[in-house]
Image (cartoon, rainbow, N blue to C red):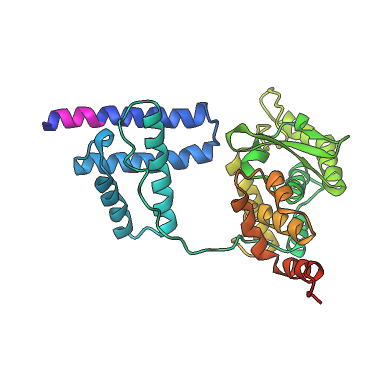
Amino acid sequence: MSAGERDAAQSRFERDASDYLSYLADVRNLSEHTVRAYRGDVEAYCAWARREGVVGDVATHRDLRRYLAELTRAGYSARTVNRHLSAVRGLYRWLVGQERVATDAASALASPKLSRTLPHAISDGDVDLLVATCDESTAEGLRDRALIELLYATGARVSEVSRLDVSDVDFAQAQVRLFGKGSKERVVPVYRRALSVLSAYLQEARPSLVARGRGERTSALFVSTRGNRMSADALRTCFERHVALAGIDPGVTPHAMRHTYATELLSGGADLRSVQELLGHESLATTQVYTHLSVGRLKEATRQAHPRGE
């Protein structure tokens, strides 16, 4: 293959890769944050292939191993290399399904081994400190209090909270409807305190925030100071501001609230399948990691259930 032919073939592969990213956003309806991460990884692979003279649609298993080796030599962690590999696998799996490439060179690649780390959870006392930083005499403060309470009450991903409309909160049934990855819907119960704060926010704060918009009305549950739906990034920034004000571990993120929610449920006796459904996990193995944070509960269950547990 001449240099010109190789360049044309690689350009065609890059267009196919762009179509794959559009598929993730438009068909699978993945979050903007997830699609952005996939785009960065897929474009990094395409740039490497062009630089190395590798044509993506006829890349071999050996070519892909060279790519992963270069990432490792560049100092990327095993977790980051794994993420890049996952993106490349997804790309080739889709290309084969679309009959745009003949073989899936990525399917046989082994993932780098990862050190097992436990999810980060925070204490109920830390949640109280977060709540205490919210000035509920202001619209923004009451909104932020409602955000923290909702994250703690539902274990929702911040991207799911960003997509919530007012109509997704059912006060009569004490539940909220969440749309997870791939727009999969689930209904999660909400405890009374969180509902009370959400009700106060909707009645006393949200109308004034919406009124600050340019005459536009929004169905969004959480609204910015400009009257617009708050993006996932805006919600993270808001949350992180209260973490700083509370003086707790700066590594605490909205996702830590999700971990805390799962851990508290398991510690309180909820079964793993129920927690899996509430979190919206596809695989039970993903949920199972939280059992490592609830060793005391497992010991107590063994003591009570085993015939010689006493």
Name the one closer to the observer, 126 or 209. 126
- Rendered location of residue 78, percent (x, y): 41, 58
Does the segment drawn in magenta span residue 8?
yes
On the image, which quarter does residue 132 sit in? Answer: bottom right
Point out the image quarter for the N terminus: top left
Give the prevailing secondary structure in the magenta stretch: helix
Can residue 179 be seen?
yes
Name which residue lies at 65% across and 59% down.
290
Vertical position of residue 154 compared to residue 178: above or below: below
In the displayed structure image, the side of residue 30 where residue 3 appears, left or right: left
Residue reaching furthest bottom?
310
Which residue is found at the position 29% from the left and 50% from the top?
65
Say which of 246 and 97 sits in front.
97
**x then y, percent, for residue 296:** 74, 70
Above or below 306: residue 120: above
Quarter of the image for residue 222 reads top right
- Asked which quadrant contains residue 163, the reply is top right
Which residue is the extreme one toward the front?
307
- For the point 68% across and 28% down, the residue is 213
Query: Looking at this view, is 209 or 59 the one in front?
Result: 59
Residue 151 in view (yes/no): no
Q: Is residue 244 above or below residue 282?
A: below
Q: Which residues are magenta?
A: 5-10
Tell me, yes or no, whether the highlighted magenta stretch contains residue 310. Answer: no
* Residue at x-position 59% and y-position 61%: 251
Quadrant placement of the C terminus: bottom right
